[in-house]
Amino acid sequence: MAITITPRHPALGAAIGGVDMRRPVDAETVRRIHDAWMKHLVLVFPDQPVSDAEHVAFTRYFGEPEVFHQTSLSLRSDRVKEIFLVSNVDERNRLLPPSEPGQKQLSSSRQWHTDSSYRPMPSIGSLLHGIEISRTGGITQFINMYRVYDDLPEALRHEVEGRKARHDFSMLSRLVGSPPPTERERAAMPPVWHPMVRRHPVTGRKSLFISSIYNDAVEGLDDGAARRLIEELSAFAAQPQYMYRHVWAPHDVLMWDNRCTVHAVTPHDPAERRVMHRTTIVGREPVLAA
Ligand SMILES: [Fe+2]
């Protein structure tokens, strides 16, 4: 299978042509896709009307799909357990209002983050399938955190070098007022400390590793100073020269690397349906300190 690679932005993002996710993909093509992924960080596969089963099968070429630990908010599909629902429509086809608890929690994705960073071995990457896309917003924005790290002003670099930040899943509920995780969910996902500068296990490159929605503490700083530092780093990162903004077309599948990018979605009209299914690739190793 011959694939084409078309960059979408100088910093990150490339469209991949010549792949049909509904069919088995040979090992050589998987290797080429993986090489392109490591180079471009975010891959766009246009026109892939995959079923959930095909989406999960394609994900398995790159690792084990995660089964989301939280079941109390109906964000995990009842039909295919590896599918996480990034949707304002439930599996019975009902439009959900922004006040619905799962929607409240999902609203945190408007702030810069990387998926499943609260795990002891954070996710490698995610694949998001746009089934019904937004026309009023819902643009997914990605940042190349290698470049952000490379360009950090000296004072900020000094703040993060050799330091750890805590990632806590239950911070979401404090941030957006969604229901706190149950006792059991909390016990399954206790807070973890990760280096703020990490080394990518494949590329060997250093990147800034932070999350506006999960970082609730930074080593050696009080709560206010920790919050200010994460906000300052996020503001520095969110500059156009580091950012690819993906305007969705129906049945785009996006595949991003959670180890060297952060992402955030823009708001959209809540009366408009947005149906997106995500798989998340389980991490295989702790975050490497740089
Ligand atoms: Fe996300």
Image (cartoon, rainbow, N blue to C red):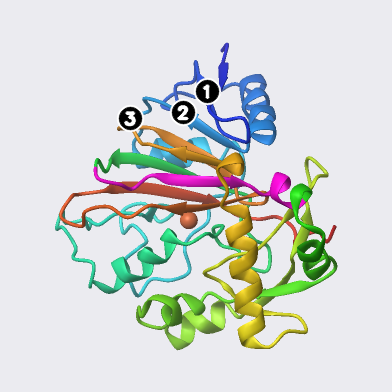
Q: How far from the left and from the top, in percent, is residue 118?
A: 60, 69
Residue sitting at 16 percent across and 58 percent down? 95
Tell which residue pokes out farthest to the top in this image: 2
Q: Nearer the viewer, residue 101 or 269?
A: 269
- What are the residue bounds of the magenta stretch? 136-149
Instruction: Please indicate whether residue 135 sits to the left or right of residue 197 in the image.
Output: left
Q: Which quarter of the rendering shows the N terminus?
A: top right
Q: Amino acid at mark 2?
A: Phe
Query: Which amino acid type is shown beneath numbered disc 1?
Result: Ile
Q: Residues within 10 Å of mark 3 (few under 14, many from 20)?
A: some
Q: Secondary structure at mark 2?
A: strand
Q: Is residue 194 above or below residue 25?
A: below
The numbered dot on residue 45 is 2
- Estimate the spatial distance between the alpha carbons at disc 3 and disc 2, rounded to whole Å: 10 Å
Q: For marks 1 and 2, give the CA distance.
A: 5 Å
Query: Is the residue indicated by label 2 positioned so its CB lies within 8 Å of ligand 1?
Result: no
